[in-house]
Image (cartoon, helix red, strand yellow):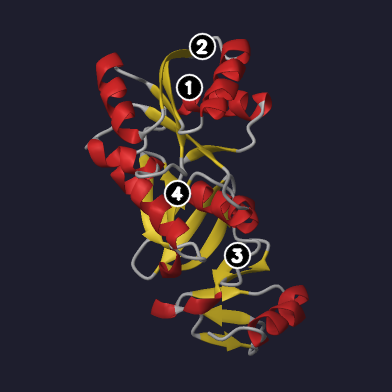
Amino acid sequence: MRAIIIDDEAHARETLLNILTQHCPQVQIIAQAANVKDAVKLINQHHIQLVFLDVDMPNENGFALFDYFDKPTFTTIFCTAYSDYACKAFEVSAVDYVLKPISSSKIIAAVNKAITTNNLQNKQTVGALKENLSLNQLQKIALPLADGLVFIKIDDIYYFEADGSYCNVITATETLIVCKKIKDFHELFAQDARFFRVHRSYLVNIQQLKTYSKKEGLNLYFGNNKCVPMAREKKNEFEVHIGNLSV
């Protein structure tokens, strides 16, 4: 793959170049750029297929790159020194990234994923990422369906429902069959107080909860009369959880 490194720090570009040269023979570094404007010219000139993009740069940050392309034909691996929260933002936005300081193992894994998935970022993907990074709470999630990705607001989700190797994502208007297991979403939202695993098969959005009923078992009711059973062993933990929230 013809690739370019975009980073305003020369030593960071050199470190990445050395790792790629030694460990990723399938990647050919065609050029390097210290800013977005120079990078745009090089990408167009050399028909670049893979971009290693620093996020935090002066003048224009890495996200500005996508303002110059209506439909990017290159895969992007973001290189970032962001916090743990930001890592979640990258994950829910379906964006490939490596954390700084970079290592050979991180780069190898990212390159292999880029080659096998051919994940082309577009304005919708990057827009969701920027939105997720702009606040201290995740706003949108990219859900992998059989035929691509769909972006929805996280607050619109009623609950996640386990379905074997898949997961059903239920909202007020639709049920989306997602190519992930419920444990993936449980891990993703483990530190997000909006969500609680009430049952091995259900991860619910507390903010969308309408009624918590203890009649005839433990049941949670959402809009459109959608109902989720709660495991009895989760009762005390759940009640403590909702007692600590302002919903």
Where residue 66 sits, quadrant-wise, is top left
Residue displayed at 60% across by 54% down: 182
Asked whether the viewer can see residue 109, the reply is yes
Q: Residue at x 34, y 19 (%)?
A: 48
- Real-space Cα separation, disc 1 to disc 3, in angstroms: 34 Å
Mark pair 2, 4: CA separation? 26 Å
Circle 4 residue: 93
Q: Residues within 10 Å of mark 2 (few under 14, many from 20)?
A: few
Tag nearer the camera, 2 or 3: 2
Residue type beneath disc 1: Ile
Amino acid type, callout 3: Tyr
Nearer the observer: mark 4 or 3; the answer is 4
| Alpha-carbon span between mark 4 and mark 3 | 22 Å
Residue picked out by circle 2: 26
Q: For the N terminus, which image quadrant?
A: top left
Mark 4 residue type: Ser
Residue 13 in the image: x percent, y percent? 52, 25
Q: Position of residue 195 (x, y in %)?
A: 58, 69
Residue at the disc numbered 1: 115
Percent x, y of residue 147:
36, 39
